[in-house]
Amino acid sequence: MDDTTIYALGTPTPSRAHPGALSVIRLSGPRAADALIFLTERKAFERGRSAREPALPAPRRLALRTVLDPLSAETIDRGLVVWFEAPNTETGETMAELHLHGGRAVVNAALAAIQRLGFCRLAEPGEFTRRSFENGKLGLTEAEAIADLVGAETEQQRRLALQQMDGALHRLYEDWRMQGLGALAHLEAAIDFPDEDLPEGLAAAVTAAIIRLRDQISAHLDDRRGERLRDGLSIAIIGPPNAGKSSLLNLLVRREAAIVSETAGTTRDVIEVHLDLGGWPVVLADTAGLRETGDAIEQEGVRRARARADEADLRILVLDASDTGWSVTLQALTAAATRWVAARDIVVVNKIDIAPVEATGAVALSAKSGAGLPELLARIERSASELMEQGAGVPPLTRARHREALMEAHAALDRALEAPEIALSAEDLRLAMRALGRITGTVRIDELLDVIFRDFCIGK
């Protein structure tokens, strides 16, 4: 990290269609306060006035100022400015902000004026947050949570990001690392002082600690809540042909996402739609009708439908109320695939506008009129909540990077338990702690940081 003063637009870039009422430009670095003076006082720039002179408003106090081009002295806008003294700032450096009107011309002129100062440069994506990390203002998992919060599209994603920003995941991983370090210290003592009278049962205690840590990591790896929230819960709509699966998909997404036809076998491939259902991000999949067929293409569609049903977090089984044998079809499908129609899965008996039925335990629905939709949505939300509450109380695993490091730590702990010599066991335990440290940033790898922060938006 260099000591250059950086700047960027901290609000969405205004466009002709969406100019915005306000725009905020942020600066961070040793000369952020100088930049604020030179942009609001022409004579200060000409004399090279320092930030310690009285032209600055009181720190952390918004002040009304005219923002000028430092070379031509032309007025750019009149707005509010504020500055913050280091180290008690978001980045740990001196920071400043310009709160201006949100038109494109105003924003472009202000950014150009800062560039003409000669001692500021445009920030790279994620550089503000990276400086916060570099200056010890937040850990690596908290930094990643900021990106998650910016990208959150549903209520549950927002809540998870805030939980991680609060340090829940950091504390969990650091606690595991400290447990491992405690066991490692005992192993190192046994290696360095083989002739000393070490406490009885030390080896058994170390083994128990490693097993306990490995089992905690294993349970965490099995917890898919975080990844489901990031990528969306997978819900497969399955059932026989012409039961109304595509109509149900269109009803849920409120648009014509899938072709609806009375011709059986119209849906040949899996159709995916992303949506927000009750605050949960969902990937809804319409699948081919399940039946025996001699058509090679339809056979492939059925195979894909079964595969998607097996992989899905939840399944919605749609049956045709006008088919008098729908209950028999339900029994046959349940018997043919025991994973389907589990406790959280949902059975929908569709077309009740044609054939009203009593469907105990199922949702009676008309995809045509929307009758029964509120009950179906409530069932989906309840099933999703039950699925996501598994392991509640422990912050969930959220990123592929974390999973990779945890799998590496888990494998190293396995090796430590099986190592034929104490020195080899200690080395494997050390590797496990290093893998955990990479998640939180305790172990520094600059190439890894470059990958993480380049995915941020500019200005964050």
Image (tube, grey):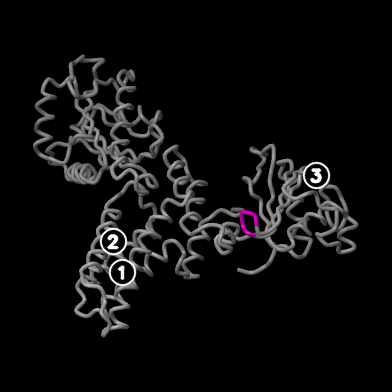
Magenta: main secondary structure = loop
Q: For this view, does 315 lie left or right of residue 227?
A: left
Q: Spatial distance from mark 1 to mark 3, Cα to Cα?
A: 62 Å
- Classify 10 Å Cα crowding around label 3: few (below 14), some (14-19), many (20 and above): some
**Region rendered in magenta:** 88-92
- Mark earlier in primary sequence (1, 3): 3
The residue pinned by badge 1 equals 183
Quadrant assignment, res 198: bottom left
In the figure, 122 relative to 165: above or below?
below
Up/down of 146 relative to 22, above or below: below
Identified at 53% across, 57% down, the residue is 138
How far across and down, in percent of the image, does residue 131 sit?
A: 59, 61
Q: Amino acid at mark 1?
A: Ala
Amino acid marked by disc 3: Asp
What residue is disc 3 on? 77
Instruction: Using the image, determine if residue 424 lies above or below residue 161.
Output: below
Q: Nearer the viewer, residue 248 or 275?
A: 275
| In contact (CB < 8 Å): disc 1 and disc 2 | yes
Q: Between residues 317 and 201, which one lies in front from this camera angle? A: 201
Give the image quarter of residue 384: top left
